[in-house]
Amino acid sequence: MTRTVAMTGAYLKQNTVPVQQGTSYAISFETTATGAKLLEQITSKAVSYPSGSYQNLLLITLDDEVISQANVIGVISD
Protein backbone atom coordinates (compact mmCIF):
# COMPACT_ATOMS: atom_id res chain seq x y z
CA MET A 1 0.00 0.00 0.00
CA THR A 2 1.33 3.44 -0.96
CA ARG A 3 1.21 6.22 1.61
CA THR A 4 0.23 9.67 0.32
CA VAL A 5 2.38 12.55 1.55
CA ALA A 6 1.42 16.15 0.74
CA MET A 7 4.03 18.56 -0.58
CA THR A 8 3.85 21.35 2.02
CA GLY A 9 5.97 24.29 3.09
CA ALA A 10 7.76 21.90 5.44
CA TYR A 11 9.63 20.63 2.38
CA LEU A 12 10.76 24.07 1.21
CA LYS A 13 14.02 25.71 2.25
CA GLN A 14 13.75 28.99 4.10
CA ASN A 15 14.97 31.03 1.10
CA THR A 16 11.52 31.25 -0.57
CA VAL A 17 10.85 34.76 -1.89
CA PRO A 18 8.35 36.54 -4.15
CA VAL A 19 9.78 37.85 -7.41
CA GLN A 20 8.05 40.61 -9.39
CA GLN A 21 7.56 39.80 -13.08
CA GLY A 22 6.04 42.83 -14.79
CA THR A 23 2.76 43.54 -13.02
CA SER A 24 2.49 40.14 -11.33
CA TYR A 25 4.53 38.05 -8.94
CA ALA A 26 6.10 34.60 -9.00
CA ILE A 27 7.51 32.61 -6.12
CA SER A 28 11.14 31.55 -6.21
CA PHE A 29 11.66 28.48 -4.03
CA GLU A 30 14.07 25.66 -3.35
CA THR A 31 13.07 22.30 -1.95
CA THR A 32 14.71 20.14 0.66
CA ALA A 33 16.02 16.74 -0.47
CA THR A 34 12.73 15.10 0.59
CA GLY A 35 10.75 17.88 -1.08
CA ALA A 36 12.63 17.35 -4.35
CA LYS A 37 11.71 13.65 -4.31
CA LEU A 38 8.07 14.46 -3.54
CA LEU A 39 7.85 17.07 -6.30
CA GLU A 40 9.40 14.62 -8.76
CA GLN A 41 6.85 11.93 -7.79
CA ILE A 42 3.93 14.37 -8.02
CA THR A 43 4.92 15.79 -11.41
CA SER A 44 5.82 12.33 -12.80
CA LYS A 45 2.30 11.18 -12.08
CA ALA A 46 0.63 14.43 -13.23
CA VAL A 47 2.45 14.54 -16.59
CA SER A 48 1.00 11.14 -17.48
CA TYR A 49 -2.50 12.69 -17.70
CA PRO A 50 -3.75 14.77 -20.64
CA SER A 51 -3.14 18.51 -20.47
CA GLY A 52 -6.25 20.27 -19.20
CA SER A 53 -7.44 17.39 -17.03
CA TYR A 54 -7.61 18.08 -13.31
CA GLN A 55 -5.07 15.28 -12.66
CA ASN A 56 -2.52 17.21 -14.74
CA LEU A 57 -2.73 20.35 -12.61
CA LEU A 58 -0.19 21.48 -10.05
CA LEU A 59 -2.10 23.53 -7.47
CA ILE A 60 -0.63 26.11 -5.12
CA THR A 61 -2.74 26.66 -2.02
CA LEU A 62 -2.60 29.10 0.86
CA ASP A 63 -4.86 28.64 3.87
CA ASP A 64 -6.73 25.88 1.99
CA GLU A 65 -7.54 28.16 -0.99
CA VAL A 66 -6.13 27.59 -4.47
CA ILE A 67 -4.16 30.72 -5.35
CA SER A 68 -2.48 29.42 -8.50
CA GLN A 69 -2.52 26.43 -10.80
CA ALA A 70 -0.55 25.23 -13.79
CA ASN A 71 -0.61 22.33 -16.22
CA VAL A 72 2.34 20.01 -15.68
CA ILE A 73 4.26 19.65 -18.96
CA GLY A 74 7.37 17.94 -17.59
CA VAL A 75 8.82 16.25 -14.56
CA ILE A 76 10.29 18.66 -12.01
CA SER A 77 13.38 17.21 -10.39
CA ASP A 78 16.34 18.61 -8.55
Image (cartoon, rainbow, N blue to C red):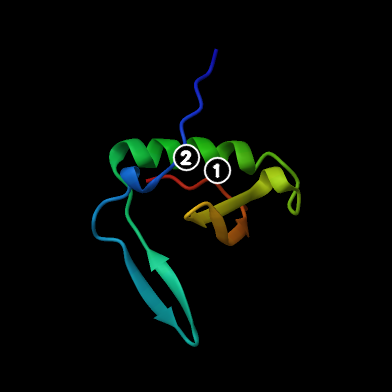
Mark 2 packing: few (<14 Cα in 10 Å), some, or many (20+)? some
Residue at the spot x=47%, y=37% of the render? Answer: 6
**Mark 2: which amino acid?**
Glu
Q: Is residue 37 above or below residue 74?
A: above
Q: Which residue is mark 1?
A: 43
Left/right of residue 7 with respect to residue 33 in the rendered view: right
Q: Position of residue 19 (x, y in %)?
A: 37, 75
User: Which secondary structure lies at badge 1?
Assistant: helix
Q: Position of residue 66 (x, y in %)?
A: 58, 57
Mark 1 packing: few (<14 Cα in 10 Å), some, or many (20+)? many
Q: Position of residue 75 (x, y in %)?
A: 53, 45
Residue at the spot x=52%, y=51% of the render? Answer: 64
Q: Position of residue 70 (x, y in %)?
A: 61, 59
Residue at the spot x=24%, y=60% of the render? Answer: 15
- Asked if the residues shown at circle 1 and circle 2 are in contact, with their CB atoms under 8 angstroms apart, the answer is yes
Q: Which residue is mark 2?
A: 40
**Mark 1: which amino acid?**
Thr
